[in-house]
Image: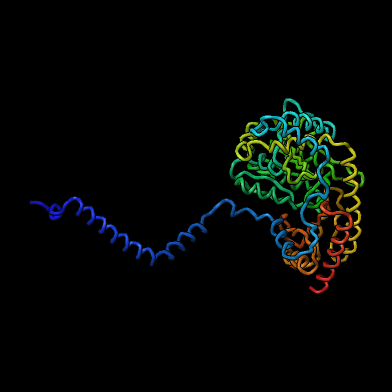
Amino acid sequence: MKSGSEDFSPHQKSQGLKSLLRGHIYERIKYSSSKRDTFTESLSDRMKNFISRMEAVQSPIIPVVGELIKSNPGTISLGQGVVSYNPPREAIELLPKFLAEPGNNLYKAVEGIPPLLAAIEAKLQAFNNIEINDENCIVVTAGSNMAFMNAILAITSVGDEIILNTPYYFNHEMTTTMAGCHPVLVETDENYQLRVDAIASAITSKTKAIVTVSPNNPTGVVYSEEALRQVNQICKERNIYHINDEAYEYFTYNGVKHTSPAAFSGSSEYTISLYSLSKAYGFASWRIGYMVIPKHLLVAVKKVQDSIVICPPVISQYAALGALQAKEEYLKTNLEAIAQVRYDVLNSLNRLQNQCTITPADGAFYFFVKVHTNMDTFELVERLIKEHLVAVIPGTTFGMDNGCYLRVAYGALQKETAKEGIERLVIGLQAILQNN
């Protein structure tokens, strides 16, 4: 016995099937139309509820303050930590050589081009008294923040601990959290100097490194050679790393000297030093830094760098090579100008002695001001921008939640602009605090 469908020709059966499918699809479209908003909303909600490790990482504050500045034209920024001057002439003069050499459009060595590595080695010997030997090596990075990321990923596993001194540099805390590690926060003293005993007490079986930043961001203080030696010795005895960020190595005042822990005898196997051209050489957007690491970390560091950037931008490496060949007058002139701005800024800030605590700072280009108020720090920052057209960075982003702190940066401004900016800050703080 034949089925009913067998009474139709192949063409009729084909058309009938298409009609059936069209009807089914139409019904599905009607159903989908009625449910589309619900489905889309449900999908959107599911994606919004997706949990990422980034949920635990604080958002960078500089862009947030930048948007407030943009919304209030005429604002003078005492916020971002950059310098006002340009790279040296020698950096720009080396760029035609980069363009003239065939093959410079290709990837180069992960750890940096040989001429730049040689120039850095000479600089380390001359300025930092660091000898490159069989136990350590140099890696050129796309800025010192990348150097810190390289170091953390190379030495840790998820759940390990990194000791940071508060107030900390916010990118160090962010990187540590991104890596799935735990920042262990140790308070500095009333002058933002290291409390070595407290650091030693914070070490556990999960500790992988102690981080120091000297000259310091955000406080501007310079750690003494004795304190850095003590921390470095603790790291040696406890078999952990000492990571020292030296981005502001040239910015010291009043005869204070910079100390590089990697210069201490016998420290090469556990000391990691981070450097940047962004500050002293006006290289912020060129993204070149470098690190001195124990040689046993080289393979791990190269894995990280190869995955993120492959090699630092080669054109920037050529510019960096030129910068390191600049005459001494370049640094001398620019650093003297910043020192003069610092002097003026400090004199103005001292007018706030009754409303603020101004801690002495002999390095970098920051002052970290404690404001005597119960106001929310970010609210104060907002009011300073909106009512007085001057921007600073809230201390909360540096881990200072107990009190109202402001980071004042003066490196990015010419003398007259800095003078006007700090005047606005002083008058603004006096007005807001008086009426609060």
Question: Image quadrant of residue 368?
Answer: bottom right
Q: Position of residue 25 (x, y in %)?
A: 32, 59
Q: Nearer the viewer, residue 227 or 244?
A: 244
Q: Is residue 317 left or right of residue 434?
A: left
Q: Nearer the viewer, residue 396 or 188?
A: 396
Question: Image quadrant of residue 125?
Answer: top right
Q: Is residue 13 left or right of residue 367?
A: left
Q: Is residue 381 left or right of residue 258?
A: left
Outermost residue to the top? 134
Q: Is residue 410 visible?
A: yes
Q: Position of residue 416 (x, y in %)?
A: 89, 57
Q: Nearer the viewer, residue 267 or 54?
A: 54
Q: How is the image coloured?
A: rainbow
Q: Is residue 297 visible?
A: no
Q: Position of residue 398 (x, y in %)?
A: 73, 54
Q: Is residue 324 above or below residue 80?
A: above
The image quadrant where one finds the C terminus is bottom right
Q: Is residue 242 above or below residue 54?
A: above
Q: Residue at x 75, y 65 (%)?
A: 72
Outermost residue to the left? 1
Q: Residue at x 82, y 59 (%)?
A: 369
Outermost residue to the bottom? 435
Q: Position of residue 5 (x, y in %)?
A: 15, 54
Q: Residue at x 48, y 58 (%)?
A: 46
